[in-house]
Image (cartoon, helix red, strand yellow):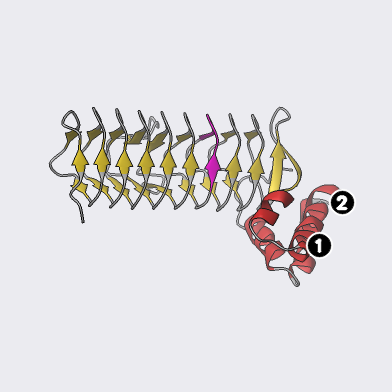
Amino acid sequence: MAAPSIHPTAVVDPSARIGANVGIGAYSVIGADVDIGDGTIIGAHCTIEGPTRIGRDNRFHGHAAIGGDPQDKKFDGERTELVIGDRNVFREFTTINRGTGNGGGTTRIGDDNWFLSYVHVAHDCNVGSGCVFSNNATLAGHVEVGDFVILSGFTGVHQFCRIGAHAFIGMGAFVNGDVPPFVMVAQEGYGRPRGVNAEGLKRRGFDGERISAIKRAYRALYVSGAKLDEAKQQLAALAQGSADVREVLEFIERGERPLLR
C-alpha cells in the first residue's frame, strides 16, 4: 500500500491518522483526532476538524468544511463526533457539523452518497446510504434521512424531521413534517406530498407489483380523505401482503413529529 500524498502547504495535526493512498491537497487543514480511511482524496483548501472518523475512498472537493462545531448555542465544547462511511462525494463548500452532547453526540453519514456544492448537514443528523443532495440542500439539526433519498436543489428540512427511504423532495421544497418512504414532495409554500416516486423505484429494481402496492398505500394515506388513524387501519390491512407497505406503516408509528399530509 502506498503512503499518503500530502501537499507541502497542507497542515496535518500530528494526532491525525491518515490511511494508505490518501491524498491531501494544497492548503488543506486536518485537525486533531481525525481518522481518514484508505484511498480518500481531499482537495485544496478543505478543513476537517475532529473528532471525525472518515471511511474508505471518499472524495472531498475544494473548500469543504467537515466536522466543525455544531451551530447550536447550547453546545459548550463537549466531546462530540462526526462519522462518515465509504465512497461518499462531497463537492465544493459542503459543510457537515459534528453532533451535540444533548442530541446523541454524533452526526452520521452512510455510504455512497453525493453531496453537491453548498449542501449543509447540521448537528446530530443521520443520513443513510445511496442518497443525492443537490446544490444548497440543507438539513437542520437532528434530521433522519433514509437510504436512496433525493433532495433537489434548495431543499430545506426542519429540525427533528424524518425522510423515509426512496423519497424524492422537489426543488425548493421546505419540509416541516415527516415524509414517509417512497413519497414525492413538491414545492408549494411548504412542501406537499405529490404521489409516489415510481420512476426512482423502477430504476432501483422495484417490479410493478411492489409499486402498485405502494401506490395503494399512498392513496389510503393521502387521497382517500381518511383521518390518520383510519388511514393507518387501511395500511395495516395492505401491509399483510406487502413488506413495502409495512415499512411505511412502521415509519408512521415511530414518528414524533406530525406527518407531512
The answer to whether residue 32 shows anywhere in this view is no
What residue is drawn where x is 73% and y is 68%?
242
The N terminus lies in quadrant: bottom left
**Along the line of sight, the residue nearer the viewer: 170 or 230:** 170
Residue 13: percent from the left, percent from the top? 16, 38
Q: Which residues are magenta?
A: 131-139
**Residue at left offset 16%, top offset 31%:** 8
Residue that numbered label 2 is attached to: 224
Q: Is residue 236 left or right of residue 253?
A: right
Measured Cα–Cα span from mark 1 to mark 2: 10 Å
Q: Of the residues shown, which amino acid type is indicated by label 1?
A: Gln
Q: Residue at x 22, y 37 (%)?
A: 31
Which residue is situated farthest in the right direction here?
Answer: 224
Q: Is residue 17 magenta?
A: no
Q: Nearer the viewer, residue 113 or 219?
A: 113
Give the SS element for disc 1: helix
Q: Vertically, is 206 above or below 148?
A: below
Secondary structure beneath dot 2 equals: loop
Q: Does the magenta run of residues contain 135? A: yes
As drawn, the residue found furthest toward the left would be 14
Left or right for 230, reference 8: right
Residue type pointed to by label 2: Ser
Judge whether 254 appears above or below 108 on screen. below
Q: Which residue is mark 1?
A: 234
Relative to 1, residue 29 above or below: above
Is disc 1 in contact with disc 2, using a CB cutoff of under 8 Å?
yes
Viewer-proximal residue among 227 and 129: 129
Classed neighbour count for the residue bearing mark 2: other residues with Cα under 10 Å, few (<14), some (14–19), many (≥20): few
